[in-house]
Amino acid sequence: LKYSLLGTPTQEWAVTTPALGTASAIAVDSNGSIFAFDGNTSIVKYNSDGTKVATLAVAVTVGDTKARRVILDEFGGVYAGFAGFDTGLVFKWREEEDGTYSQRWTLEVPGIFRDMNIQNDLLYVLLDAGAYLTLDVGSRIIVYGGLLGEYAPTPVWDKELPHPLHAVDVLSSGTVFFASGPSPTRGVDIGSDTSTYADSAVDWTPMRLTNIADRLHYWLDASYITEITNL
């Protein structure tokens, strides 16, 4: 769906992906072209008018792999992140002169892929070491360098982060912001290694928002359910 935001939002066009797959993530480039997942096996590119112009095939070889994130760099590179049962994959494509896309590399990351971002030729990847809210399971961010090369990037640095992880953003200065949801398995201590970066963490909930009584309609948090029964 594309909406015009001049005044009251109005729908301009809508398309259905060719394989009728779930468009679990999208990205938009500077020309208004849209890159959308079509299930877990391809990414479809539409121009700003909603016309399909390219398909990027995904060669996923790990079973039960789910599409999580698609991002673009300023040079036309397309990156897709996938989460498997206990691993993650990142793919990169580059546009050719005829408008088609060729896959440049595949990167297998050591953990369950949660999110990624790009800044200054660096790839920032969030990973969980185990299933969501599992006891004694950690999370980390790994930063890879050399995105513009022909080969898979290599690790530059990594840090442990509070489990579980959800999203990451990076400023041009290199400052990293990440989201980690409330967890009964975690306190506020995220480690003592502050030699190369500053950190802070709280177990945040929406109840800490200003004027929460006037702003919150409802809030559902299942993270403290300790037993699952068949209903």
Image: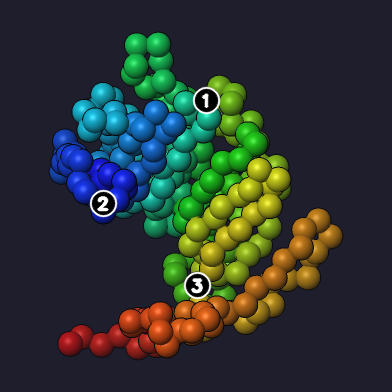
Q: Earlier in the sequence, mark 2 or mark 1?
A: 2
Closer to us: 77 or 171: 171
Q: Position of residue 82 (x, y in %)?
A: 40, 47
**Gap in Å between the C-alphas at discs 2 and 1?**
31 Å
Q: Residue at x 38, y 87 (%)?
A: 225
Residue 26 spot, x, y in % from top left:
35, 44
Mark 2 or mark 1, which is nearer to you?
A: 2
Viewer-nearest of labels 3 and 1? Answer: 1
Near-viewer residue (179 or 86): 179
Q: In percent of the image, x 70 and y 70: which residue is there?
A: 200
Q: Amino acid at mark 2?
A: Pro
The amino acid marked with disc number 1 is Phe
Q: Nearer the viewer, mark 2 or mark 3?
A: 2
Please give the residue where the numbered disc 3 appears in the rendered image. Answer: 181
Which residue in the protein does label 2 denote? 9
Residue lying at the far right of the rendered structure: 195
CA neighbours of label 2 inside 10 A, class few (<14), some (14 to 19), many (20+): few
Do labels 2 and 3 touch, CB within 8 Å?
no
Query: Who's the residue at 49% across and 84% down the image?
Result: 211
Instruction: Give the spatial CA distance, label 2 vs label 3.
Output: 31 Å
In percent of width and height, residue 169 lies at 56, 52
Q: Which residue is mark 1?
A: 75
Identity, as a three-letter code, of the amino acid under mark 3: Gly
For label 3, the SS is loop
Q: Are marks 2 and 1 in contact (CB under 8 Å)?
A: no
Q: Is residue 41 left or right of residue 17?
A: right
Q: Answer yes or no: is residue 221 visible.
A: no
Give the image quarter of residue 118: top right
